[in-house]
Amino acid sequence: MEDPGQRLKSLVAKANDFNVDGKIPAVRYLRSSKEMEKQATTYSAEDEYENGFLLFMKMITLLVEKLPKHPTYKNLSVDQRKESKQRCKKAFTEAEKLKTHVKKKYEAEYKLWQNAEEQRIKNEQEEEARKAKEAQKALDALSIKSTASPSLPSSSIPLPITTIAQPTPPLGSTTPDNEISPPSYPIVPSITPNSQIPQSPQSPLTGQPFSPAPTDHADAYQPTSPNNQFPPPSHVPYHVLPPQYQSSAQPSVPPSYQDITANQHITPTPRMPHFDRSSKPVTLSSLDPQQSFIPTVHRDSKPTDIISRQISDSLDGNRQVVIPADLVPRFLQAVSANTRRNLETCGILNGSLSRNVLRVTHLVIPKQTATSDSCTTECEEELFEVQDKYDTITLGWIHTHPTQTAFLSSVDLHTQCSYQQLMPEAIAIVCAPKYQTTGIFRLTPDYGLKFVTNCTQSGFHPHPKNPPLFEDSPLVRTDDVTRIQIVDLRR
């Protein structure tokens, strides 16, 4: 784990890691800084110090460093610039407060980590000592068993003996079956007072003197006798063998390739999953209202892993987006007159942040001009006033395709790009009343967003389809309880 100071530096570096697109008006970035401030204030109130500090720092970087370099920054009014400076000073003050909390939190976590590491090392050392002790016990037991083995007496060591040769019976002679031939007896040399006892008998094989066998191997010698015969190996009971050594009498033949492939009990090698790219885009009816939108936390995860994941979610566009289930039907009802005239209509999705979840609560339909395949909003200042009135932030947009299917055209892609650059979780809802389908899309974060950002063309123009530039948003779930509030500025 990094020390607290280094973790703070990493957090600040993450807050500064973003670019400003010159194609998006400076006034939109100025509005985005206000939404950052609202989110940071919410995180601060919920004791989410890292996310609050991070967004305040991002807001400061935008207003102080990056926005003044924007090509349309000079178009901002004096009042707008003055207001941004005041909010920036406030952000500095709040960021310093949160920095103190973050540093204390990091120091406490670092101390816990140090204690856990010390305990882990201690446990490992104790385990190694325990294993060494058990191994020594096993060696000691083996040594005691070896020294306790009985030794044969010296008189049991056989001396060299000779036998009396029996006369060969005459050819053709027989011995009755009930008679036993006399055994061959050894000739024991007699010892007299004048006899000399050899000091070291000679081995009949090597001619070298005999040496007594070591006592620890004496028990290996067992004289054979008719009453001390071991049964042949084929009669050894099967159960006396250890299981790992038990096997059939005949060695098994290695299976052939055909035998292996024909065996139904052999598990096949898993294949790579197949994805059907022809599947229809997600629709509101396919979204599970009961699906939990609370981020799953594994209890076995380290605290720093959970913190890093939450911080990443707030910057990388992975927070859940909850929309009311009545959003689409009520929007289609409100714009039905334009749909009958084959005119597109758009609306802006507004909502709030709570417990790291983004909730759509308001739908604002601004004044706009429309054609059969496009619409352009007007009087953007009125939209900002509504957002300030209800204290909401922008979470995406919704529009109709009166005669087409639900997809993102090249113009739609550029519109979505401007929303997603300012709010990574921003969604684009496309309604196709003629086909009774609805798609909820976003630009692919790893490719589509970067590609469209770098595209300099305007109007309708071709884009490559592979890799795909947009996808169904995986972050959306519906809420059957909350009802959408519609603010129609066209009236």
Image: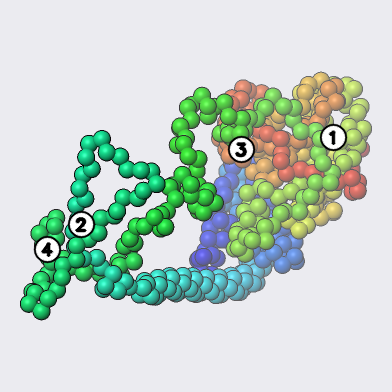
Q: Nearer the viewer, residue 105 or 205?
A: 205
The residue labelled by disc 1 is: 285
Q: Position of residue 297 (x, y in %)?
A: 69, 57
**Could you tell which of marks 2 and 1 lies nearer the N-terminus?**
2
The residue labelled by disc 3 is: 449
Q: Position of residue 187 (x, y in %)?
A: 19, 62
Q: Quadrant of residue 141?
A: bottom left
Q: Nearer the viewer, residue 149 or 200?
A: 200
Q: CA distance from mark 2 to mark 1?
A: 107 Å
* Helix, strand or loop status at disc 4: loop
Residue drawn at point x = 57 percent, y = 26 percent: 262
Amino acid, disc 3 = Leu
Q: Which disc, if any, is residue 163?
A: 2
Amino acid, disc 4 = Gln
Residue drawn at point x = 22 percent, y = 60 percent: 186
**Could you tell which of marks 3 and 4 lies nearer the N-terminus?**
4
Q: CA distance from mark 3 to mark 4?
A: 99 Å
**Could you tell which of marks 3 and 1 lies nearer the N-terminus?**
1
Q: Residues within 10 Å of mark 1 (few under 14, many from 20)?
A: few
